[in-house]
Image: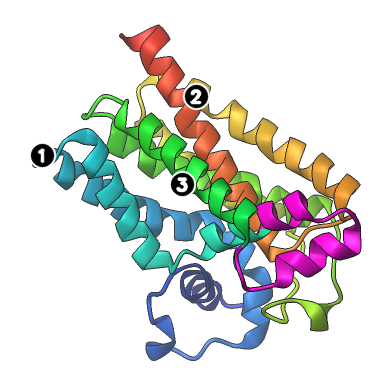
Amino acid sequence: MNMMKKLFAAIGFFTRIPVWRITEIPAENYKRVVDLWPVAGWITGGITALVLWGALNVLPPFAAVVTAFACRLLLTGGLHEDGLADFIDGTGGGTSRERILEIMKDSRIGSYGVLGLIFYFLMLVSCVASLPTEIAPLIVFAADPWSKFCGSFLINTLPYARKQEEAKNKLIYDRMSVSAFAICFIAGVLPSIFLPIPYWLALPLPLLIAALMILYLRYKIKGYTGDCCGATALLCELSFYFSAAIITRTLIL
């Protein structure tokens, strides 16, 4: 499979960048987009970090972080945030596997999803705004790809929870080969080398969150969905910022 086609598929799937205007992407490439999910994170995380760096020069930290992540929402179309809301709605309101999957597939957002997104964004903005202004953009750039790598564990450890024809996008991701997993890991961890060494301690918690999500999903719905992947990536990213905020207050200040 052509690597450039896979890259274009990943960028087109995880962002609103119209790569389809540049080249035609065969449908089978979309089954392997998770292989290069962290590479798409270089784009989303890089642009968010760049906007944050610029905004921090003219705005208070809280407003600068809101501005940066609003730009990321425009870039991604809120793809993973929609997944997080559906995941919280389903697991919050469903009492059985079938009911959870039914609620998650419903495009309407419920009270659990609304409250979940509110608390998620409040925690995210508060943690990032608390970071040193000279380090915050680097942490954002590192957290995005790493959290996407952590989220990719779902497709390698769990079966898809629905039949393919029942999937929202009619797509089931292929599991990664050893070489694809290695590329995914390298792409996920590479931006972290630009961080001061104490902030490397933020890397383990997202892995733990991903592991807990895998155990929870195996128990609740005996598999994963696309919404679960997006939700896991965002929760892993939030845990990275949470760790970085603690590191700042305990080891840096």
Secondary structure that dominates the magenta span: helix
Residue 104 place in picture, x, y as percent: 72, 65
Distance of mark 3 from mark 2, alpha carbons?
14 Å
Find numbered disc 1 in the image and state the secondary structure of the residue it sits on: loop
Foreground: disc 3 or disc 2: 2
- The disc placed on residue 246 is none
Q: In the image, what residue type sits under mark 3? A: Asp
Q: Does label 3 or label 2 sit earlier along the sequence?
A: 3
235 shown above or below 5: above
Q: What segment is highlighted magenta in the picture?
A: 87-109
Label 2, label 1: how far apart the Cα atoms are: 24 Å
Q: Nearer the viewer, residue 202 or 77?
A: 77
Q: Quadrant of residue 193?
A: top left
Q: Which residue is mark 1?
A: 57
* Mark 1 or mark 3, earlier in chain: 1
Return the disc, 2 or 1, that comes first in the chain's sequence: 1
Q: Left or right: where does residue 62 sit relative to residue 139? A: left
Residue 101: say if magenta: yes
In the image, farthest residue toward the front: 111
**Mark 3 neighbour class, 10 Å CA radius: few under 14, some 14 to 19, many 20 or more:** many
Q: Is residue 65 left or right of residue 102?
A: left
Query: In which quadrant of the rendered view does residue 198 lie?
Result: top left
Q: Which residue is mark 3?
A: 144
Name the residue that disc number 2 marks.
Answer: 243
Q: 227 and 205: which one is in front?
A: 227
**Percent coordinates x, y for residue 108 in the rendering:** 61, 71
Residue at 63% across, 61% down:
110
In front here: 197 or 162?
A: 162
Look at 83% across and 40% down and name the residue there: 215
Give the image quarter of residue 221. bottom right
